């Protein structure tokens, strides 16, 4: 049996490693991977990375995240979005390499974290918008694919 770090959910053309949480809040398409009990990396999932086009701009505007409040802006030629924080906490590290070259997210979305955060309220991981269960994640991504096809 594969370890959690090796398990990947495939939905259509998209892959989602199951060693992390996915934030469905406002269709943000962010992932959050716990590094230890209180520290996590936050990045953009494969769905957003592939559907938005090649990212050309990324700005992180806060050293303190508040769940649901915008903490970053990301842009491509056809897309601009403010990213809402999936959790509250203090930014302990900014991935300067990804901020200066956001197209790295398109190349490897699950290795191109944006920020590392020390969570102030780990219980936020249990919120309804934080998906970790494969079936709930699959259902959400299938709805997102449908929504994209209708546009």
Image: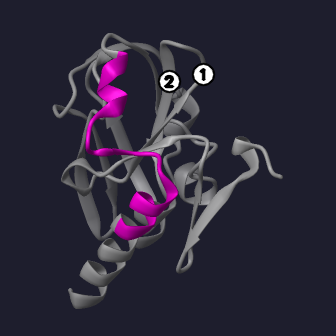
Residue 52 appears in the rendering: no
Identify whether 133 is placed above or below 46: above
Image point (46%, 62%), residue name: 135
Q: Please report the bounds of the magenta region as a residue range.
A: 122-139
Please state the horizontal and vertical placement of residue 101, each as a whole percent of the image: 53, 44
Q: Which residue is mark 2?
A: 40
Identify whether 103 is placed above or below 19: below
Task: Considering the whole magenta stretch, tell me its main secondary structure.
Answer: helix
- Classify 10 Å Cα crowding around label 2: few (below 14), some (14-19), many (20 and above): many
- Classify 10 Å Cα crowding around label 1: few (below 14), some (14-19), many (20 and above): few
Please state the horizontal and vertical placement of residue 36, each as a whole percent of the image: 59, 16
Identify whether 96 is placed above or below 48: above
Give the residue at the far right of this rendering: 1
User: Element at badge 2?
Assistant: strand
User: Element at badge 1?
Assistant: loop
The tag on residue 126 is none
Please state the horizontal and vertical placement of residue 96, each as a whole percent of the image: 52, 28
Residue 10 appears in the rendering: yes
């Amino acid at each position: 049996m594969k370890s959690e770090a090796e398990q990947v959910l495939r939905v259509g053309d998209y892959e989602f490693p199951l060693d992390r949480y996915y934030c469905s809040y406002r269709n943000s398409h962010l992932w959050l991977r716990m590094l230890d009990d209180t520290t996590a990396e936050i990045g953009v999932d494969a769905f957003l990375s592939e559907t938005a086009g090649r990212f050309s701009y990324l700005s992180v505007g806060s050293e303190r995240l508040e769940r649901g409040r915008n903490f970053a802006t990301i842009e491509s030629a056809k897309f601009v979005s403010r990213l809402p924080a999936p959790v509250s906490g203090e930014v302990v590290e900014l991935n300067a390499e990804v901020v200066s070259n956001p197209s790295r997210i398109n190349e490897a979305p699950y290795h191109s974290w944006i920020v590392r955060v020390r969570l102030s309220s780990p219980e936020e991981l249990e919120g309804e918008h934080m998906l970790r269960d494969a079936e709930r994640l699959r259902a959400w991504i299938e709805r997102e694919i449908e929504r994209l096809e209708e546009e």
